[in-house]
Image (tube, rainbow, N blue to C red):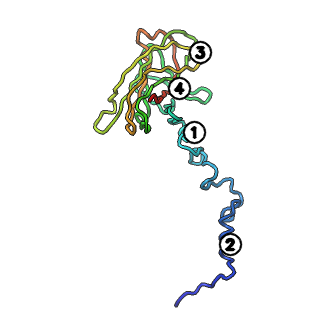
Amino acid sequence: MPLYLPADPAGTAAAAVSTHEADTSSVHGITNTSTLYRSGGTDVAIADGGTGASTAAAALTALGGKTLTGDRISLGAGTLVSCQGSPTLATSTNTPYWRLDDGSSVGLEGAGDGFTVPPGWTTVDISFVWFNFTTDAGDVRLQVFAGMLADGVSHANYNIDTQVTATASSQNLIVRTTVASGFAVTPGRWMAVAGCRRGADAADTKTGDIGLLSVEIVRAS
């Protein structure tokens, strides 16, 4: 038997649907929408499974990951893992850092081995952002490894191995030291980065630990 649906000559149903779609104060009868997320609305909080941000760069920062701001990529301490010696991951005023001791070689690398080089980048500078953990003065020997990865290439295939000597700052004063300059990169390729304090090197004269906050990759050209 055919099923006949009643007509809506007055447009009552259509009006009801239109009103419902335009209603931003309630959802399906829920008048308190403060706990609901909708497209174009409030960013989903980290505690609710979101990022608390509306852009990729802000999301990475909020999650404590790799930060991309303009022509700078920052591998924060939270994304670095130990690859040599026994560095210690610690936190100061809610900021993570790695304690690199003296007297031995201690190294870190980017978790997952690195990142994809952004479009338009051809050369980069690589810097350490660090601070003097103690009151001891002296020089610190810093080393960086970096390489472009590809299919069939070892993940430990580092094209550069560069060392510099930097003078330790006053206690807790943050400094940025460029360890490698003008390293050639290929957009779209995976780049591996690792850093190290050569505490046993004769040029490393500072007694006591330093704190590594991040490794920064800055577009040079």
How crowded is the residue under tag 4: few (<14 C-alpha within 10 Å), some, or many (20+)?
Answer: many
**SS of the residue at dot 1?**
helix
Disc 1 target residue: 62
Marks 3 and 4, how far apart at CA = 14 Å
Query: Contact (CB < 8 A) between labels 3 and 2?
Result: no
Q: Which residue is mark 4?
A: 213
Q: CA–CA distance between discs 4 and 2? A: 57 Å
Q: For marks 3 and 2, give the one nearer the viewer.
A: 2
Mark 2 lies on residue: 16
Visible residue check, residue 110: yes
Amino acid type, label 1: Ala
* Residue drawn where x is 51% and y is 16% of the image: 209
Q: Nearer the viewer, mark 2 or mark 1?
A: 2
Disc nearer the start of the sequence (3/1)? 1
Q: Is residue 219 left or right of residue 50?
A: left
Q: Residue furthest bottom?
A: 1
Distance from label 3 to label 2 (Cα)? Answer: 68 Å
With 104 as the anchor, is 94 left or right in this view?
right
N-terminal-most mark, 4 or 1: 1
Identify residue type, mark 2.
Answer: Ala
What residue is rendered at 48% in x and 33% in y? 79
Q: CA distance from mark 2 to mark 1?
A: 41 Å
Q: Secondary structure at mark 3?
A: loop
Residue at the location (60% across, 26% down)?
92
